[in-house]
Image (spheres, helix red, strand yellow):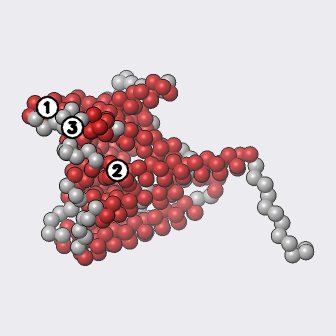
Amino acid sequence: MDGRLDPPAPETGAEAASATAARRGVLYGFSAYLIWGTMPLYFRLLAPSGAWEILAHRILWSLVLCVLVLLVLRRPFPTWRRPLRQHLGMVLAGILIAINWVVYLVAVTTDRVTEAALGYFLNPIVSVALGLLLLGERLRRLQFVALVIGASGGLFLAATGGTVPWIAFALAFSFGFYGLVKKKMGVGLGALQGLTAETAVLAPAALGVIVWLSMTGGETAFSQGPVHFALLASSGVFTAIPLLLFAMAANRIPLVTLGLLQFIAPVLQFITGLLLGEHMTPARWIGFAIVWVALAVLMADSVRARRAVPPRSRL
């Protein structure tokens, strides 16, 4: 041996394609969470519209956009020729995501963005708890430790804050149950078809909200000028685009990578809340820190479990 290092073996075509797909997947995932993380700034532009009016327009314009995309891409529309179980799943999923959306909008429109961020920090811990309690899943040791720490953080915030952080809990549990319904009730639709079905289920109620606001003088869509109407209509884009980016990312990168990327959104939301002047007491900082420790433990467990899987089994 002459002490020189052999050059690395050149990548095969399949390996190069896989690496390119992974890089694109990270970019798609980063873009999705970047949009979700900066949404509070967009929703604040919609003032003086209230949470319910924004929700109604978000549902209707998301449905319009999904239908147009399905037509352009020539993808099949969700069919109603499905088992009753799947129908119930679509209805329940629609209700849960609507609850998640309206609570988030209430948080943004009442200057509680940091509490909304806490909800999305808590969401992975809630998902682990639901898997344990409702699906009978067995927890690894670090998952159990993360669950205990996360629950302690939530209880600490509730005990020291004077009021229960209901926005955080409502966001975490509504999205946690939303994922559970999608997994357990066999909806069996992709991201685009799933959003189309869920918004179609919610569309009659959304129309009812708009009619009710018009009759009671509470609507702003047509009374604040064309720019305001255009901003409300663009809520469909801000709803559908990150979901599609997320779906493209999920098909290209490992779940662990996607799990690490998901914290971009609540971190950005948390920073946005601070920049907007929301007050954080010392007790809230401590509660957030406890939750962050739980998330660090949970992600360490995910990385460890990923490394324990043989490379070929990860594909």
User: Looking at the image, is mark 3 or mark 1 earlier in the sequence?
Assistant: 1
Tell which of 165 and 41 is nearer to you: 41
Distance between mark 2 and mark 3 Cα atoms = 21 Å
Q: Quadrant of residue 157?
A: bottom left
Tell which of 190 and 133 is nearer to you: 190
Per the image, label 1 sits on a secondary structure element best described as: helix
Residue drawn at x 35%, y 24% as measured from the top left: 80
Note whether residue 100 is visible: no
Residue drawn at x 32%, y 46% as measured from the top left: 178
Distance between mark 3 and mark 1 Cα atoms = 13 Å
Residue on which the image places disc 1? 214
For residue 280, the mark is none
From this view, report whether residue 239 is shown above or below residue 23: above
For residue 224, the mark is 3
Per the image, label 3 sits on a secondary structure element best described as: loop
From this view, report whether residue 45 is shown above or below residue 3: above
Tell which of 33 and 189 is nearer to you: 33
Residue on which the image places disc 2? 39
Q: Quadrant of residue 46?
A: top left
Residue drawn at x 74%, y 45% as measured from the top left: 13
Q: Give the x, y percent position of residue 66.
A: 40, 31
Q: Quadrant of residue 63?
A: top left
User: Looking at the image, is mark 2 or mark 1 earlier in the sequence?
Assistant: 2
Tell which of 127 and 202 is nearer to you: 202
Note whether residue 31 is visible: yes
Q: Give the x, y percent position of residue 176.
A: 33, 51
